[in-house]
Image: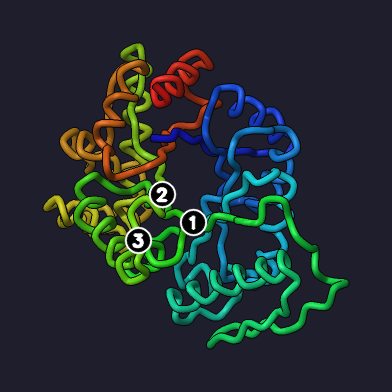
Amino acid sequence: MKIDTGLGVASFGDVAARAHKAEALGFDALWSSETQHDPFLPLALAAEHTSRIQLGTSIALAFPRSPMTLAYIGWDLQKMSRGRFIMGLGTQVKPHIERRFGIAWDHPTPRLREYILAMRHTWHCWQTGERLNFRGEFFKLTLMSPFFSPGPLEHPHVPIYISGVNEHLCRLAGELCEGFHVHPFHTPKYIAEFILPNIERGMRRAGRARTDIELASAVFVIAGDTPEELAGNRERIRQQIAFYASTPSYHPVFEIHGWKDAANQLSHLASRGQWGEMPKVVTDEMLAVFAEEGAWADVPAKVKKRYDGLLDRITYYLPVDDTGTDAQWRKTVEMFHA
């Protein structure tokens, strides 16, 4: 099982130092997300200041960009990183695509499927010199003169991961992708009974094996070597679970454990802006289902046991620079690699 970390940055001036630190601590990959900043710019800086660690987006939004735009970005980052880039894509939800980005929303899964095929076709043409000729229902790419082609790469295979919470995107990942980002709001039961069966359906459709795809996720952990550290991280995770569970599209995770009423209560509190009341709904029993807890040295073995056969790479849902010491993180990474 690989252990990765997130590149949470408030300033691009921090990227080089944080990327260098993540590589020095031994993490397998560094993931950049699309929230308040573009997810690709930090990875360009990280590529320049690292040599081993994989670099990926977890996730970048596909639909506000054209397949050709992302093909260029992915090709450039693959070249800059010397083959270490992972293109992680997501669809987002309809209100964000329509009202935040001003883009039309329709047929998200078929559109994302075609999006992936269009990017791969473009990369193939750049690598081989063949004529660009992609004709789909949503995208038509047929113009690529030599002046606009970046040409071949030493490492032309760019892995594509996608994320999602419904069965259609899980099946698409199983059919076409090298990886799937499981949403952090999950439990082992939910992965085993919903995520994996749908990914396996997609794999069977394409004649693929489980070894052809990696499942990755940020996982909730409550690590601490003092009562104060444990208490602080416990409440941090409790609050995050309450926030996620208040979103109706994530209710099935609670419902599979018989907590439908709690999910509805959290949605009600969120609609009224009663954020401070929401963590009280998440009981210690719920917390234990979602998160492993213990001393820093004990958590890796617990996490590996919890996700054995379910996830191939994990990220602690704890920021490296705000929790734990360098020694604690280095030991954590060593225990995952042991």
Helix, strand or loop at label 2? It is strand
Tell me the kind of residue under disc 1: Tyr
**For mark 2, what is the residue?**
214
Residue 221 falls in image quadrant: top left
Q: Quadrant of the N terminus?
A: top left
Of the residues under marks 3 and 2, which one precedes in the sequence? Answer: 3
Q: State which mark lies toward you, 2 or 1.
A: 2
In the image, 46: left or right of 212? right
The residue lying toward the viewer, choosing from 233 and 330, is 330
* Residue at x-position 34% and y-position 39%: 239
In the image, 306: left or right of 99? left
Label 1 and label 3: CA atoms lie apart by 14 Å
Crowding near the residue tagged with mark 1, few <14, some 14–19, many ≥20 C-alpha atoms within 10 Å: many
- Total of numbered circles in the picture? 3
Q: Are marks 2 and 1 in contact (CB under 8 Å)?
A: yes
Residue 153 falls in image quadrant: bottom right
Label 3 and label 2: CA atoms lie apart by 16 Å
**For mark 3, what is the residue?**
165
Residue 99 in sight from this viewpoint? no
In the rendered image, the vertical position of residue 258 relative to residue 71, given as above or below: above
Q: Are marks 3 and 2 in contact (CB under 8 Å)?
A: no
Of the residues under marks 2 and 1, which one precedes in the sequence? Answer: 1
* Residue at x-position 44% and y-position 81%: 107
* Residue at x-position 50% and y-position 79%: 105
In the rendered image, the vertical position of residue 214 relative to residue 6, given as above or below: below
Q: State which mark lies toward you, 3 or 2.
A: 2
Q: Are marks 1 and 3 in contact (CB under 8 Å)?
A: no
Q: Which mark is residue 161?
A: 1
Tell me the kind of residue under disc 3: Val
Q: Quadrant of the C terminus?
A: top left
Crowding near the residue tagged with mark 2, few <14, some 14–19, many ≥20 C-alpha atoms within 10 Å: some
Tell me the kind of residue under disc 2: Glu
